[in-house]
């Protein structure tokens, strides 16, 4: 059997394993993931081969956002209408599919890169690997096709690398320790405070606040390091997604360190295309408001997240 064929079989096995991993929580959403992948792959091929590229791009992005909006924001929209109008529309009680924000944003970036001519799909198999590879599928980081494809096809990826195995296991162990031993234990104290907010003492409030802050920190830091460690086991270098944000010297520096791939995505695919800071202060403020609104809604469907995102813009200005 040729080496190329063996490499493709190894890739196919990794894709199947990743789909099994995704479906372990709830297999009902595996078809949704498969349909999303096939749809975006088809749209990407149409962008490459058709003349009306911009219309196809906008159609593909709109479909992706409608899918994400239905699952993540439909009940938020209905509850908002009920609150404003006094109506009593029934909630859909939709269960959010795991990782839908990550695989949606990953594929939107792919479509834009195809439109820009900086990403070209060489096979459906490698596109499946790009979207489904399990170290990033559930909790990120958001990866780029143009950066990952060269790693997927190089010969070194399919060879045993003892250095990467040792380094990957070490990084994964550190991340797992942060998540299980630190973040999960801090969550107990944070939950006590939030569940008894009406009867908190001064000391209990501070314990709850600090516990919650550190829980978020070690939870996200742990997941980010686990993803990088797992990637190295397959000779893949996933992008850094977390860089000690509590050591930041300013709010801008903080956002450059926390959820780094989301910040890069918003900058490259929203803030700069909207004009960035190139067209005056008012346009810059508008672009920041839209970008931080998106980041706020990314973290959750609720007005608290919307207000949090817009308040962050005030801190940035």
Image (tube, rainbow, N blue to C red):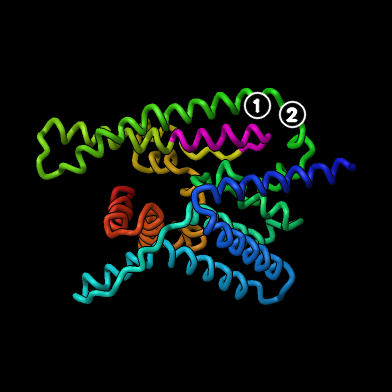
Please state which of residues 293 and 102 is positioned toward the viewer in this rendering.
Answer: 102
- Above/below status of 108 relative to 253: below
Q: Position of residue 294 (x, y in %)?
A: 40, 58
Q: Residue at x 57, y 45 (%)?
A: 21
Compare marks 1 and 2 and give the one earlier in the sequence. 2
Label for residue 152? none
| Residue 205 visible to an observer of this rendering | yes
**Span colored in magenta:** 221-237
Residue marked by disc 1: 165
Residue marked by disc 2: 160
Q: Position of residue 89 (x, y in %)?
A: 28, 75
| Residue 112 visible to an observer of this rendering | no
The reply, left or right, for residue 13 in relation to residue 69 is right
Q: Position of residue 135 (x, y in %)?
A: 57, 41
| Element class at badge 2 | loop
Residue 53 is inside the magenta segment: no
**Magenta region, main secondary structure:** helix
Q: Place residue 44 in its image quadrant.
A: bottom right
- Above/below status of 239 relative to 69: above
Whether tag 1 and tag 2 are in contact, CB under 8 A, the answer is yes
The reply, left or right, for residue 119 in relation to residue 276 is right
Q: Residues within 10 Å of mark 1 (few under 14, many from 20)?
A: some
């Amino acid at each position: 059997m040729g080496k190329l064929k063996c490499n493709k079989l190894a890739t196919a096995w990794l894709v199947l394993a990743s789909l099994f991993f995704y479906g372990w929580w709830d297999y009902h959403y595996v078809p949704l993931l498969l349909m999303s992948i096939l749809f975006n792959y088809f749209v990407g091929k149409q962008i490459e081969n058709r003349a009306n590229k911009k219309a196809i791009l906008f159609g593909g992005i709109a479909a992706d956002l409608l899918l994400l909006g239905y699952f993540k924001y439909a009940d938020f929209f209905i509850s908002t209408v009920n609150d404003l109008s006094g109506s009593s529309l029934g909630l859909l009680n939709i269960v959010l599919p795991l990782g839908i924000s990550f695989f949606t944003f990953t594929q939107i970036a792919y479509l834009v890169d195809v439109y820009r001519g900086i990403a070209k799909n060489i096979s459906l198999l490698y596109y499946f690997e790009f979207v489904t590879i399990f170290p990033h599928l559930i909790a990120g980081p958001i990866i780029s096709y143009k950066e990952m494809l060269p790693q997927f096809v190089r010969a070194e990826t399919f060879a045993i690398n003892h250095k990467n195995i040792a380094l990957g296991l070490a990084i994964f162990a550190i991340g797992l320790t942060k998540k299980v031993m630190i973040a999960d234990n801090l969550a107990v104290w944070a939950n006590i405070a939030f569940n008894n907010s009406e009867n908190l003492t001064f000391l209990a409030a501070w314990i709850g606040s600090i516990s919650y802050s550190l829980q978020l920190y070690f939870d996200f830091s742990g997941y980010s390091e686990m993803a990088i460690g797992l990637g190295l086991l397959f000779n893949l270098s996933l992008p850094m997604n977390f860089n000690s944000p509590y050591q930041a010297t300013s709010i801008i520096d903080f956002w450059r360190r926390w959820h780094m791939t989301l910040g890069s995505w918003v900058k490259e695919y929203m803030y700069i295309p909207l004009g960035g800071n190139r067209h005056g202060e008012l346009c810059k403020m508008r672009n920041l408001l839209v970008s931080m609104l998106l980041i706020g809604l990314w973290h959750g469907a609720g007005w608290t997240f919307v207000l949090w995102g817009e308040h962050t813009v005030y801190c940035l200005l």
